[in-house]
């Protein structure tokens, strides 16, 4: 293994083990330089309480909105067993001005798993809404004036009524190409489609336990139905992760930051959702599970914000330090692809600005929520 690659693995392990060099050395000594999450847990067990800090969620909310078995953290619950309790507001369906044009338009898609055709899929018209971001880079949609104000998170996930396959990416389904006048196959790998066929009953059982019913298939959805749609997308991505599809853990982290945002918009606690997002983002970082390197910088920035939100200041600063060290390494390397160093600097500067502003009023304010 090259020296650069060895240093990269050490950097990722140090972040995971919270700068505990002894744990990093023990991991490499016992398991080499291939990162495996089971081996990570083995080392953690050998160093009990090393580098641990107390977590205090910065959010204020109602009662916790998930049920975990005794002694089990919400982040450890399998995707099909993670059932969220919804408050009354979660069942509301936000409505826009009916005199204005909808920014949504239908897109015909078919299911690659159960072959059900004509699914209710909605695209967002280009430049119809402007996008702001919450502190964890989840999108908040704002009207530009001409179109209705629609929370696209409540419509973005296409869900198959037949087998509960779900994804916000239309390319995961079978698309009709108007130019070629032919169907375009799903981008999901064949082995993932096979696994999804075999696990249909698990997704249906999860759907039944949520109690959402037909509200899941009405667009736009309620907050509760929108959350369940992203949970079903996460269940699909869990299968992709098991099949080692590049970017699966990155997707899962992003799905859960969106669930966290929907929880906030519904007046619910976002702590458990952000905890799950952090675990998936950490796994993506450790495995370098990114289609493009720029995505890694964004994930480090999001992890910095999540740990700052949980009042884990040391861990937050560790991730900011990772970005700074990455910037230094990129500046010293030759042949860095165009755009990579500027992207690293962008996310690092955003992190530094957030750190400097952390005592400001409304630091954690989500756009659109008073």
Image (tube, helix red, strand yellow):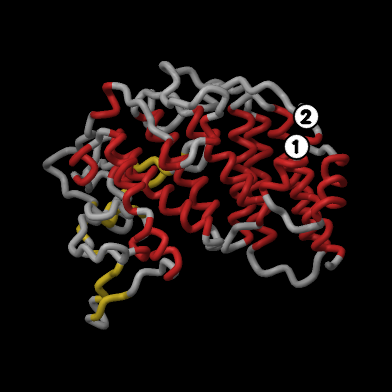
Question: 214 or 222, which lies in front?
Answer: 214
217 sits left or right of 266 in the view? left
Q: Position of residue 151 (x, y in %)?
A: 30, 41
Residue at the spot 60% in from the left edge and 47% down from the top edge: 299
Q: Is residue 144 visible?
A: no
Q: Which residue is mark 2?
A: 48
Q: Which residue is mark 1?
A: 44
- Residue projecting furthest to the bottom: 180
Q: Is residue 88 above or below residue 155?
A: above
Cβ atoms under marks 2 and 1 closer than 8 Å: yes
Q: Position of residue 328 (x, y in %)?
A: 80, 54
Gap in angstroms between the C-alphas marked 2 and 1: 6 Å
Q: Is residue 6 above or below residue 209?
A: below
Looking at the rendered image, the quarter that the N terminus falls into is bottom right
Q: Quadrant of residue 162?
A: bottom left
Question: 177 or 24, which lies in front?
Answer: 24
The crowding category of the residue bearing disc 2, from other C-alpha atoms within 10 Å (few below 14, some 14 to 19, many at least 20), is few
Q: Position of residue 261 (x, y in %)?
A: 42, 35
Q: What is the secondary structure assignment of the residue under circle 1?
A: helix
- Residue projecting furthest to the left: 99
Residue at the spot 21% in from the left edge and 38% down from the top edge: 213
Residue at the spot 72% in from the left edge and 24% down from the top edge: 53
281 sits left or right of 187 in the view? right
Residue at the spot 61% in from the left edge and 51% down from the top edge: 284
Q: How many marks?
A: 2
Q: What is the secondary structure assignment of the residue under circle 2?
A: loop
Q: Is residue 341 visible?
A: yes
Looking at the rendered image, the quarter that the C terminus falls into is top left
Q: Position of residue 90 (x, y in %)?
A: 29, 28
């Amino acid at each position: 293994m090259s020296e650069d690659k060895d240093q990269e693995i050490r950097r990722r392990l140090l972040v995971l083990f919270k700068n505990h060099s002894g744990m990093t050395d023990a991991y490499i000594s016992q398991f080499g330089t291939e990162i495996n999450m089971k081996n990570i847990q083995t080392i953690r067990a050998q160093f009990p309480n090393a580098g641990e800090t107390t977590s205090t969620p910065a959010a204020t909310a109602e009662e916790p909105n998930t049920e975990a078995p005794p002694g089990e953290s919400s982040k450890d619950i399998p995707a099909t067993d993670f059932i969220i309790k919804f408050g009354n507001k979660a069942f509301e369906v936000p409505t826009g001005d009916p005199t204005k044009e909808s920014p949504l338009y239908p897109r015909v898609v078919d299911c690659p798993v159960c072959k059900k055709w004509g699914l209710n899929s909605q695209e967002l018209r280009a430049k119809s809404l402007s996008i702001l971001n919450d502190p964890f880079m989840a999108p908040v949609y704002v009207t530009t004036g001409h179109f209705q104000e629609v929370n696209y998170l409540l419509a973005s996930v296409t869900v198959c009524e037949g087998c509960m396959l779900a994804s916000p990416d239309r390319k995961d389904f079978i698309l009709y190409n108007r130019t070629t006048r032919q169907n375009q196959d799903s981008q999901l790998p064949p082995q993932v489609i096979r696994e999804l066929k075999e696990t249909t009953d698990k997704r249906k059982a999860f759907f039944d336990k949520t109690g959402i019913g037909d509200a899941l298939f009405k667009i736009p959805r309620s907050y509760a139905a929108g959350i369940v749609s992203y949970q079903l997308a996460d269940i699909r991505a869990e299968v992709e992760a098991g099949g080692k599809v590049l970017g699966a853990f990155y997707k899962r982290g992003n799905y859960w930051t969106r669930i966290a945002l929907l929880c906030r918009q519904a007046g619910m606690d976002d702590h458990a959702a952000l905890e799950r997002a952090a675990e998936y983002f950490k796994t993506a970082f450790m495995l370098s599970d990114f289609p493009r390197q720029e995505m890694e910088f964004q994930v480090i920035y999001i992890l910095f914000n999540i740990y700052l939100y949980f009042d884990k200041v040391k861990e937050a600063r560790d991730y900011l330090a990772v970005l700074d060290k990455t910037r230094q390494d990129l500046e010293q390397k030759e042949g860095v692809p165009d755009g990579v160093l500027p992207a690293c600097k962008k996310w690092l500067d955003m992190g530094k600005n957030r750190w400097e502003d952390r005592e400001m009023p409304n630091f954690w304010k989500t756009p659109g929520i008073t």
